[in-house]
Image (cartoon, rainbow, N blue to C red):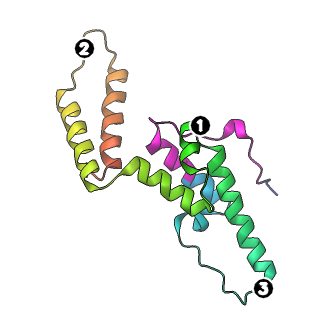
Amino acid sequence: MASSDISSANLPILTEKNWSRWNTQMQVLFRYQDVQEVVEGDYQEIPSGAADERKAEERKKDNKALFLIHQCVDDAHFEKIQHAKTAREAWSILVRCHTGGEKIKKVKLQTLRRQYELMQMLDGDKIREYFDKVIAITNQMKGCGEAI
């Protein structure tokens, strides 16, 4: 049986520049740790008459997810979520900080489209490096909802 313990050295850390990648890695980590429903809202409040054992199990899942989120953010992000009482609350704060509203997405897309249009391969660039830049920009555009 595989252990569900994960070394903190292997955990992805959220910074100001890696939201898209970090978000994807965290989704996998939440599924692996069986806490995704607690974080993403499929989680149902336990009725007051439910068994104490079930309540304790759900509380344990929520605390586990919140612990994972705390372990996977840098100091600046931790400051934003440190007072969150649940994993869902902490996750929602991080999503709002990085995705913004529709207007912010539009501005980001306009900026990325412009970068894409102006992109040129320089004399010293290797084909692989240029291709990696193109892929990075198109992935960012997809992350903002652009169909490519």
Q: Quadrant of residue 37?
A: bottom right
Name above or below for residue 120 compared with residue 105. above
Label whose residue precedes the other's in the sequence (1 or 3): 3
Could you say whether the residue bearing mark 3 is in a helix, strand or loop?
loop
Q: Position of residue 138 (x, y in %)?
A: 30, 40
Residue depicted at x 17% and y 32%: 117
- The residue nearer to you, when weighing 120 against 80, is 80
- Furthest toward the front, the residue is 83
Label whose residue precedes the other's in the sequence (1 or 2): 1
Identity, as a three-letter code, of the amino acid under mark 2: Leu
Q: Residues within 10 Å of mark 3 (few under 14, many from 20)?
A: few
Disc 1 from disc 3: Cα separation? 38 Å
User: Which residue is label 2 attached to?
Assistant: 122
Disc 3 from disc 2: Cα separation? 66 Å
User: Which residue is label 3 attached to?
Assistant: 51
Q: Position of residue 16 (x, y in %)?
A: 46, 36
Give the residues drawn in magenta, as a range: 4-26
Label whose residue precedes the other's in the sequence (3 or 2): 3
Identity, as a three-letter code, of the amino acid under mark 1: Asp
- Label pair 3/2, CB-CB below 8 angstroms: no
User: Which residue is label 1 attached to?
Assistant: 75
Identity, as a three-letter code, of the amino acid under mark 3: Ala
